[in-house]
Structure formats: C-alpha cells, structure tokens
C-alpha cells in the first residue's frame, strides 16, 4: 500500500467510526473464501457492513477521536486478522455471528463497541445478541405508559365517574 492509499483508507475508517456508534471487531481468519463469502452475504442480508482492515490503519483512525469516545479500550483487540462489522443496530452483528456459528466455528468476537461501552471477548456474543434495539425499547415504554391509560378509559366507559375513580384510588393508597 502506498502512503496515499493508506491515508485514503484511514480517512474512510475515520468517517465510518464517526458515523457508527455500533461496531464489532471480529476474527474470521480460519474461514475459507467460500465461507467468508457466505458470511458477507449474511451480513448484507441483515444490514451489517463487514470490512477487513489493517489494524495499524484502524488504530490511526481511532486515535483521531477524543478520549471520551473510549476507543483506546479497543487497541488491544486490534491484533491479528481483523474484520469490522458496522451496523445501525447494536445487536444485529452479534445475531449474525451467532447464526453463522451454527455451522462454523468462526467468526470470533474480539471486541464490540456499543455507544462508548466496550465489550471485549467472545463470551459477550449471547448477551449482545439479546440487546433490544432503540425502537423495541421505545415500544416497551409506550406499552407501559399505555396500560394505565387504557384502564382509565375502560373504567370511564363502564360508567364510572372521575370522582368515583379518584375515591377508589385514594382508598387503595390508604390500605
């Protein structure tokens, strides 16, 4: 790689790290070309972008960011063959890894960066795969907020008055 090519690669990686708050560092080195192509296809299908990178270029790109991003915790994981999985959803790359490993022993999770938190080691795949997306969490909160409102509407529809409901709530609070 020429110096200009390296600078261009670092620039691309900087942009990726800036725009993605979720990415995984993996090792898929023992996979055959056919298996890597299947993994890439699964990643594409699930909306995950997989890039094989040079560790030194990744470190150079990560070093350009402020310390509060926590990228320095990833440097030890950037050794040996590395592929980065970028995603808009924190759990999708872990789900891809988990699904692909039903038939293969790789990729191995080196580290995951989830919105300034770093998870180092393959033992985190199960937990990361179980993370809920932002949309799922919002839906859960809406359901929790919606439940009392539905109860109030049902009570009012059944003929109860607001003063009767307030009295019942007051009595419930005293006991």
Image (cartoon, rainbow, N blue to C red):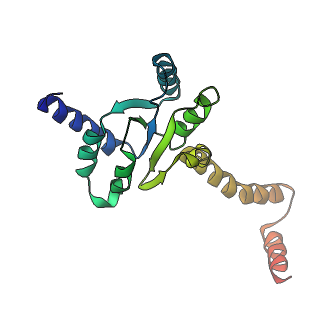
On screen, residue 92 versus residue 143, left or right, reads left
Residue farthest to the top?
34
Q: To which quarter of the image does residue 88 belong? A: top left
Q: Is residue 57 above or below residue 168?
A: above
Rendered image quadrant of residue 50: top left
Q: Is residue 129 visible?
A: yes
Residue drawn at (81%, 69%) of the image: 165
Regarding residue 14, the answer to whether it shows in the image is: no
From the viewer's perspective, is residue 137 above or below residue 50? Answer: below
Viewer-proximal residue among 105 and 8: 105
**Can you say whether 38 is above or below 15 in the image?**
above
Q: Quadrant of the N terminus?
A: top left
Image quadrant of residue 101?
top right
Q: Position of residue 96 (x, y in %)?
A: 56, 32
Tell me: 141 left or right of 7. Answer: right
The residue lying at 41 percent from left, 55 percent from top is 116
| 93 or 136: nearer the viewer | 93
Q: Is residue 126 left or right of residue 41?
A: right
């Amino acid at each position: 790689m020429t110096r200009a090519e390296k600078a261009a690669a670092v620039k691309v990686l900087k942009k990726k790290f800036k725009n993605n708050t979720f990415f995984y560092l993996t090792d898929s080195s023992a996979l055959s070309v056919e298996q890597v192509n299947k993994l890439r296809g699964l990643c594409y299908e699930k909306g995950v972008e997989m890039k094989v990178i040079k560790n030194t270029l990744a470190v150079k790109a990560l070093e350009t960011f402020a310390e509060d991003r926590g990228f320095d915790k990833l440097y030890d994981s950037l050794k040996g063959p590395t592929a980065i999985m970028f995603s808009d959803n924190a759990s999708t790359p872990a789900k891809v890894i988990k699904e692909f490993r039903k038939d293969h022993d790789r990729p191995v999770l080196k580290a995951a960066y989830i919105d300034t938190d770093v998870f180092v080691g393959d033992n985190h795949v199960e937990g990361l795969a179980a993370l809920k997306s932002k949309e799922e969490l919002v839906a859960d909160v809406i359901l929790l907020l919606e439940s009392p409102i539905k109860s109030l509407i049902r009570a009012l529809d059944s003929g109860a008055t607001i003063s009767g409901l307030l009295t019942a709530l007051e009595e419930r609070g005293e006991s």
